[in-house]
Image (spheres, grey):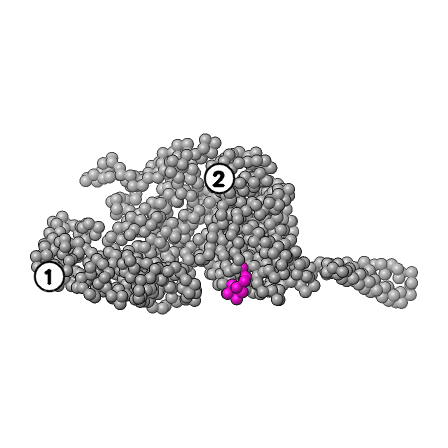
């Protein structure tokens, strides 16, 4: 007899025993009534009533106990019951996975036959991923790229392998929010049956938890992988949230896959090239390919945006599910708020009366499991959480009072800015800019599209509806005012650069069918103070299409700030204006005053050369005094009169110690710091690098505190302070370099710099496992930082010992990288 038949026979035996026991108890009660009343004719009636009551009591009790809440981390992976075979447990896992996938597709309001078609061809319709044999892999994808569905596919493949071969890995699928709540290690330990040597673990939605929780999940995954070398761990998250050395992007859909999805969902052949241009980039993501197929299957108007596809889906649901006394949209927003705050499904008893819960389930946007309610699709949950933000149902003040609270709502904020009106985006971005301009800049840069160049033509059947010119102008003016109050330093720098007053700045634009030319003008003033009528164009952009985005004025002004900061940092790289970097800049200016060939060793102490340098400095100082000026530009260097006076005094010393030695240790085999590394011993180079990095650390702190004080929590190196910088001096073919790394120390520790000489010529190695392990042990992030924007991995690079202004270059490189993370500069740092 097979195991399945034995199990069926055992279940029938139990049910038969239950019925017999109920009958015996009822007979006993009937006999008791007969004795007590002395009326035997009542015995059959009493027997029947007792049997019915007992059966009802037992059935109700069994139902209550069977529906008791279980573990709330979805999907659950509890230890197999002792009365279920291995094959039965795996088969149940496969069935649960299929149910979750169907619920996700059904929440997109697809008919059952379409869901059947997607399920039948799912392996062909999703991006192919390289199979990981063992270890840990992180796959990243944007909104709608199919992360959750791919997680299910990887899980189902593991189930199939385990069904074929008992020696295969035990499959486990975990939602990151459940792992953050219950602990990844604990979930794995109770899920893997005894005697199983390895497991296949899939973690979905790592970006839906805070970075601290994500780091803890990664730490647990690392420990699990080390403890079970044959095991495989696959993690899914959005790009840029966490970094992992084996991370890989989820590939986009091919043209063939897009066509297949459109045909299955729309019920007719639709080629991607025939759809509006505004949709085509998003069609390479499975979610929007499905939504587009659904939309065009109903013969809707061609003009639609990706965000509009989601809105239309919701409108269709609300139009269908209308019940008296129930506001369906409000109930969906309320549920999304609770699941976002809670971090997963919530008890159905907390979601209003029974008619509200039944209405939610009838929408197919919500599912019930184990007496818990939740959204099967993360995108739908984020959409209604964003709608709650836009409707003002979530207190903004509470959101901005704690970075931890805001972090839970981060994805909802991104979607809200993407789909909201101008007034709604202003109600969100304005207070966020005033509290944390760095976070607001990151949010705008991640959400609002950039402008397109004039060369990117638009289709005739894909028109762009731009707001009227006066409306756009007023919105840009409002954005300028809010940005200026939130980040006054860049605007002060811009005002100083052009000699303008922001009250006189004019915003002009010309709007055509699909083009908006934005220009910021400053009217020149005559000597008498009257405007001359002439204007200088300060900033100009052409925008196609994206100017119609309601939140685009915030992106436009962000580009103004970006240009100012880029110009400021490029100028700072030549003329550092903080105390810690002044000594190396001073030497650079002094050397620029010396006659050609003066730095050659043969001319040291030559009185004629010293006199020429003193004379040149004196001439420049005289010009400054005559013109009543305090600063003059000499080549790339900006020179102040006070520094020229000091240089003249220093040049009176024939040994030139103040001018030539500089702030850092020079060569130890020649009297001058020559343009080469041959005259440095490794120990001397180590001393030089140590001095450079100490100056860079101090200069970075001074630059941030003076110009970026409002964004200190957003800047990578600032969040790492105090820092330990350590490295090895390498003498390579191209000169003397240091391989350095930056490690964060615990708050209150002293900053450290340790540069050690290295023997021999070596190539620059990549990050080794030992290096990463050392970093993990020592990582200590300061509290209260928005850790989701910047991953504080140990930085490392090579740097030359003989660069001009070497500490300044390091500071500019660091701050440029920090600002680039939050979309306040673009491109490469100046070198």
SS state under label 2: loop
Q: Residues within 10 Å of mark 1 (few under 14, many from 20)?
A: some
Q: Residue at x 65, y 62 (%)?
A: 80
> How far apart in space, not on screen, are marks 2 and 1 (Cα)?
71 Å
Q: Nearer the viewer, residue 632 or 316?
A: 632
Percent of width and height locating residue 211? 46, 58
Q: Residue at x 85, y 58 (%)?
A: 48
The magenta span reads 223-233
Q: Residue at x 28, y 52 (%)?
A: 831
Q: Is residue 736 above or below residue 520?
A: below
Percent of width and height locating residue 329? 57, 45
Residue 551 in view in this figure: yes
Query: Pointers 2 and 1 in contact (CB under 8 A)?
Result: no
Q: Which mark is residue 605?
A: 1
Q: Nearer the viewer, residue 383 or 157?
A: 157
Mark 2 or 1, nearer chain start: 2
Q: Which mark is residue 280?
A: 2
Q: Nearer the viewer, residue 791 or 706?
A: 791
Residue 491 in view in this figure: no
Image position of 643 (left or right of 183): left
Q: Is residue 6 above or below residue 326?
A: below
Percent of width and height locating residue 273? 50, 36
Residue 217: within the magenta? no
Q: Is residue 525 above or below residue 388?
A: above
Outermost top residue: 460
SS state under label 1: loop
């Amino acid at each position: 007899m097979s195991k399945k038949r034995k199990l069926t026979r055992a279940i029938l035996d139990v049910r038969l025993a239950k019925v017999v026991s109920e009958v015996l108890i009822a007979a006993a009660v009937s006999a008791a009534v007969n004795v007590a009343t002395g009326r035997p004719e009542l015995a059959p009636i009493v027997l029947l009533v007792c049997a019915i009551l007992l059966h009802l009591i037992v059935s109700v009790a069994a139902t209550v106990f069977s529906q008791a809440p279980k573990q709330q981390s979805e999907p659950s992976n509890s230890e197999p019951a002792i009365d279920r075979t291995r094959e039965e447990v795996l088969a149940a896992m496969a069935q649960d996975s299929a149910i979750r996938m169907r619920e996700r597709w059904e929440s997109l309001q697809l008919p059952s036959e379409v869901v059947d078609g997607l399920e039948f061809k799912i392996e062909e319709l999703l991006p192919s991923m390289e199979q990981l044999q063992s270890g840990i892999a992180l796959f990243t994808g944007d909104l709608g790229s199919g992360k959750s569905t791919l997680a299910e596919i990887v899980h189902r493949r593991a189930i199939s392998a385990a069904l074929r071969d008992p020696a295969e890995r035990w499959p486990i699928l975990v939602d990151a929010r459940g792992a953050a709540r219950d602990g990844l290690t604990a979930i794995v330990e109770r899920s893997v049956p005894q005697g199983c040597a390895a497991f296949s673990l899939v973690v979905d939605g790592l970006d839906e938890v805070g970075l601290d929780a994500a780091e803890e999940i990664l730490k647990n995954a690392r420990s699990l992988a080390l403890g079970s070398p044959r095991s495989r761990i696959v993690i899914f998250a959005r790009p840029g949230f966490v970094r992992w050395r084996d991370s890989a992007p989820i590939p986009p859909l091919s043209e063939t896959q897009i066509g297949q999805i459109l045909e299955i969902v729309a019920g007719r052949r639709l080629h991607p090239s025939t759809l509006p241009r505004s949709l085509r980039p998003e069609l390479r993501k499975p979610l929007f390919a499905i939504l587009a197929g659904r939309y065009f299957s109903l013969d809707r108007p061609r003009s639609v945006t990706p965000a509009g596809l989601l809105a239309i889906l919701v409108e269709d649901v609300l139009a269908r599910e209308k019940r008296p006394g129930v506001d369906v949209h409000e109930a969906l927003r309320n549920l999304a708020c609770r699941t976002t705050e809670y971090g997963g499904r919530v008890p159905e008893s907390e979601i209003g009366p029974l008619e509200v819960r039944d209405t939610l389930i009838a929408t197919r946007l919500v599912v019930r499991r184990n007496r818990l309610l939740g959204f099967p699709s993360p995108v739908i949950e984020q959409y209604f959480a964003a709608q709650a933000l836009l409707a003002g149902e979530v207190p903004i003040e509470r959101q901005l009072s704690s970075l931890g609270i805001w972090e839970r709502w981060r994805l909802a904020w991104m979607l809200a800015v993407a789909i909201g009106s101008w007034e709604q985006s202003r109600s969100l971005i304005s207070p966020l800019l005033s509290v944390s301009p760095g976070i607001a800049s990151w949010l705008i840069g991640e959400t609002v599209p950039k402008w397109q160049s004039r060369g990117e033509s638009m289709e005739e059947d894909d028109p762009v509806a731009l707001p009227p010119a006066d409306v756009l102008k007023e919105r840009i003016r409002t954005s300028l005012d809010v940005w200026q109050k939130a980040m006054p330093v860049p605007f002060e720098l811009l005002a100083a650069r052009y000699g303008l007053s922001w009250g006189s700045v004019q915003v002009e634009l010309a709007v055509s069918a699909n083009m908006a030319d934005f220009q910021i003008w400053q009217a020149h003033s005559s000597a008498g103070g009257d405007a001359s009528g002439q204007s200088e164009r300060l900033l100009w952009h052409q925008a196609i299409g994206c100017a119609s985005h309601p939140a685009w004025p915030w992106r436009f002004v962000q580009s103004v700030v970006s240009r100012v900061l880029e110009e400021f940092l490029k100028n700072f790289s030549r003329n550092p204006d903080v105390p810690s970097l002044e000594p190396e800049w001073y030497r650079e200016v002094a050397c620029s005053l010396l006659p050609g060939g003066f730095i050659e060793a043969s001319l040291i102490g030559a009185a004629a050369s010293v006199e020429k340098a003193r004379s040149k400095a004196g001439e420049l100082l005289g010009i400054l005094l005559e013109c009543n000026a305090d600063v003059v530009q000499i080549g790339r260097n900006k020179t102040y009169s006070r520094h020229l006076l000091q240089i003249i005094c220093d040049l009176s010393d024939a040994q030139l110690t103040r001018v030539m030695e500089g702030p850092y240790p020079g060569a130890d085999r020649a009297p001058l710091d020559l343009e080469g590394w041959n005259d440095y011993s490794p120990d001397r180079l180590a001393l030089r690098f140590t001095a450079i990095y100490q100056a860079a650390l101090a200069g970075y702190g001074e630059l941030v505190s003076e110009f970026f004080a409002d964004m200190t929590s957003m800047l990578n190196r600032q969040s790492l302070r105090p820092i330990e910088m350590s490295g090895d001096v390498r003498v390579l073919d191209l000169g003397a370099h240091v391989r350095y790394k930056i490690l964060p120390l615990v708050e209150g520790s002293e900053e450290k710099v340790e540069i050690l000489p290295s023997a021999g010529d070596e190539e620059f190695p990549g990050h080794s496992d030992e290096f990463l392990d050392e970093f993990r042990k020592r990582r200590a992030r300061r509290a209260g930082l928005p850790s989701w924007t910047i991953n504080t991995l140990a930085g490392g690079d090579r740097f030359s010992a003989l660069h001009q202004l070497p500490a300044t270059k390091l500071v500019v490189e660091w701050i440029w990288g920090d600002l680039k993370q939050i979309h306040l500069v673009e491109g490469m740092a100046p070198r």
